[in-house]
Image (cartoon, grey):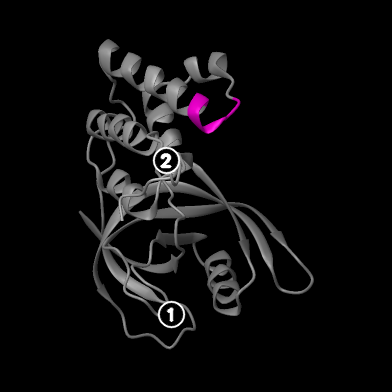
């Protein structure tokens, strides 16, 4: 693994996967600083999930390094950016820095899933469960377009946009191998798709 210094953006519920895109509206001053610094250097930002609340909460060990693609700089200092997922990383330690934003030393993962393929049964199970889940949630989906996606894009797209809680999202991010992530998605859809008489939302928390 490659060791890298990464400026991190801890954002609850925001997960970025390799090969995917994440639109972000940057308004808090320290994250304006982060984006400005990133644009001046390598355009890289590490997305991680915090474990709690507060100004500097502990964060999960695994995140995803992203590269700023499209960027809109506003007159008042805010930004709209599109972050493009590159590769996951495991945090070794947080660094003592003078910047307003946090930085870590991390191991970059070797990302080799793009060439992975699901079995026919795995792909069918994922699509069937996705249709059932979308119907329960009331989502309108272009299934013809979904059917044209390769396995890698389909699995990571569902993992990133599905309305699961933060614990489930983190589990998907940390899952190694396309088949393992696809199987976990199916399990989560079955879990979150259940309806309770008092609350039609369930969580893993």
* Residue range (magenta): 135-140
Callout 2: 10 Å neighbours few (<14), some, many (20+)? few
Instruction: Give the side of residue 74 with respect to residue 181, left or right.
Output: right
Q: Is residue 177 above or below residue 131?
A: below
Where does residue 178 sit, x and y in percent of width and height?
A: 27, 31
Quadrant of the rendered structure where residue 30 is? bottom right
Tell whether label 1 touches label 2 (CB within 8 Å).
Answer: no
Describe the element under mark 1 as helix, strand or loop.
Answer: loop
Where does residue 55 sit, x and y in percent of width and height?
A: 45, 81
Nearer-N-terminus badge (2/1): 1
Where does residue 2 sit, x and y in percent of width and height?
A: 24, 57
Pointer 2 residue = 197
Pointer 1 residue = 54
**Residue drawn at (44%, 22%) of the image:** 132
Q: Is residue 136 magenta?
A: yes
Quadrant of the rendered structure where residue 95 is? bottom left
Q: Is residue 103 above or below residue 201?
A: below
């Amino acid at each position: 693994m490659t060791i890298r210094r990464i400026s991190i953006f801890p954002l609850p519920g925001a997960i970025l996967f390799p090969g995917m895109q994440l639109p972000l509206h940057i308004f808090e001053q320290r994250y304006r600083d982060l984006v400005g610094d990133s644009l001046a250097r390598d355009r890289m930002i590490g997305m991680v999930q915090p474990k709690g609340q507060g100004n500097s909460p502990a964060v999960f060990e695994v995140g995803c390094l992203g590269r700023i693609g499209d960027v809109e700089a506003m007159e008042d200092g805010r930004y709209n950016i599109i972050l493009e997922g590159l590769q996951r990383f495991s945090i070794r330690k947080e660094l003592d820095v003078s910047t307003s934003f946090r930085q870590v030393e991390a191991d970059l993962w070797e990302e080799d899933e793009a060439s992975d393929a699901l079995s026919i049964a795995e792909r069918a199970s994922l699509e069937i469960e996705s249709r059932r889940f979308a119907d329960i949630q009331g989502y309108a989906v272009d299934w013809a377009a979904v059917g044209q996606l390769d396995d890698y894009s389909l699995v990571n797209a569902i993992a990133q946009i599905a309305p699961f809680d933060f614990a489930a999202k983190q589990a998907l991010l940390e899952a190694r191998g396309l088949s393992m992530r696809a199987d976990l998605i199916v399990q989560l859809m079955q879990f979150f798709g259940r309806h309770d008489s008092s609350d039609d939302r369930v969580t893993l928390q």
